[in-house]
Image (cartoon, rainbow, N blue to C red):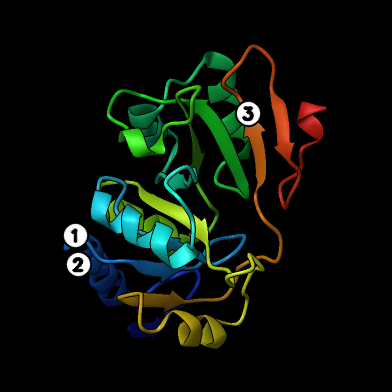
């Protein structure tokens, strides 16, 4: 594993570019978000997704969210109602995962039975720069222990995943709570999980 420490607000572009090179060749990276550290690959890299499922000890029934660079980017991968657009414009970037109806370009492995997807735009410049430079979303699942406990110390994460991940970007400004998950796929918003983001708007 390659390991680099980045400035949270002005990340060094050479390290961003290294992570993009890894993603383009089908690799797996660990990256900071405004909630937990994420484990991910290019959205369209099926082998990478299978490898992450193996690392996490999950089956292919596990549904991961993925990260877009901005609101405009989301519209390429999900069907966004006027209400959903206004809501996300108000809250993103931020510690939220929004569940939306999937667009046709989404790989089948990502689709729930309801054909929805979970999408994030985290408030962390490192992650957003990666996605912008890659040109595709990256899938995101929390870097956790085998028991599912979140990991916060970058060096501990590095030691645990060293042999199974290609590159890790460490940075400050990560959080200690999961994202709030809000389902905007139906007629009314539904709070699926209350986490770091303020959900009072949906009560």
Q: Residue at x 58, y 42 (%)?
A: 97
Q: Secondary structure at mark 2?
A: helix
Q: Residues within 10 Å of mark 1 (few under 14, many from 20)?
A: some
> Residue 174 is drawn in which quadrant?
bottom right
Residue identified by numbered label 3: 183
User: Distance of mark 1 from mark 2, alpha carbons?
Assistant: 5 Å
Report x, y in % for residue 123.
Answer: 55, 54
* Furthest-left residue in this view: 25
Residue 24 numbered tag: 1
Q: Quadrant of the C terminus?
A: top right
Q: CA distance from mark 2 to mark 3?
A: 33 Å
| C-alpha span from label 1 to label 3 | 31 Å
> On the rendered image, what quadrant is the N terminus found in?
bottom left
Residue 124, percent from left and from top: 51, 60
Q: Choose top left, top right, bottom left or bottom right for residue 129.
A: bottom left
Q: Judge by depth and name the residue closer to the eye, 150 or 136.
A: 150
Q: SS for tag 1?
A: helix
| Closer to viewer: mark 2 or mark 3 | 3
Labelled disc at residue 21: 2
- Disc 3 crowd rating (10 Å Cα; few below 14, some 14-19, many 20+) is many
């Amino acid at each position: 594993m390659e390991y680099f420490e980045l400035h949270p607000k002005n990340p060094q572009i050479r390290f961003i570019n290294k992570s993009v090179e890894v993603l383009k060749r089908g690799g797996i990276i660990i990256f900071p978000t405004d909630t937990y550290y994420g484990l991910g690959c290019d959205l369209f890299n099926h082998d990478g997704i299978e490898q992450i499922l193996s690392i996490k000890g999950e089956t292919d029934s596990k549904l991961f969210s993925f990260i877009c660079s901005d609101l405009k980017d989301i519209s390429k991968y999900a069907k966004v109602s006027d209400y959903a657009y206004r809501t996300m414009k108000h809250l993103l970037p931020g510690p939220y995962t929004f569940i939306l109806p999937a667009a046709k370009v989404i790989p089948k492995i990502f689709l729930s039975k309801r054909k929805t997807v979970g999408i994030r735009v985290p408030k962390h410049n490192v992650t957003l720069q990666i996605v912008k430079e890659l040109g595709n979303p990256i899938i995101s699942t929390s870097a956790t222990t085998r028991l599912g406990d979140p990991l916060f110390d970058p060096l501990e994460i590095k030691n645990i995943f060293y042999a199974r991940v290609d590159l890790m970007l460490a940075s400050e400004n990560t959080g200690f709570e999961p994202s709030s998950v809000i389902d905007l796929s139906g007629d009314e918003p539904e709070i699926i999980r209350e986490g770091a983001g303020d959900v009072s708007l949906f009560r």
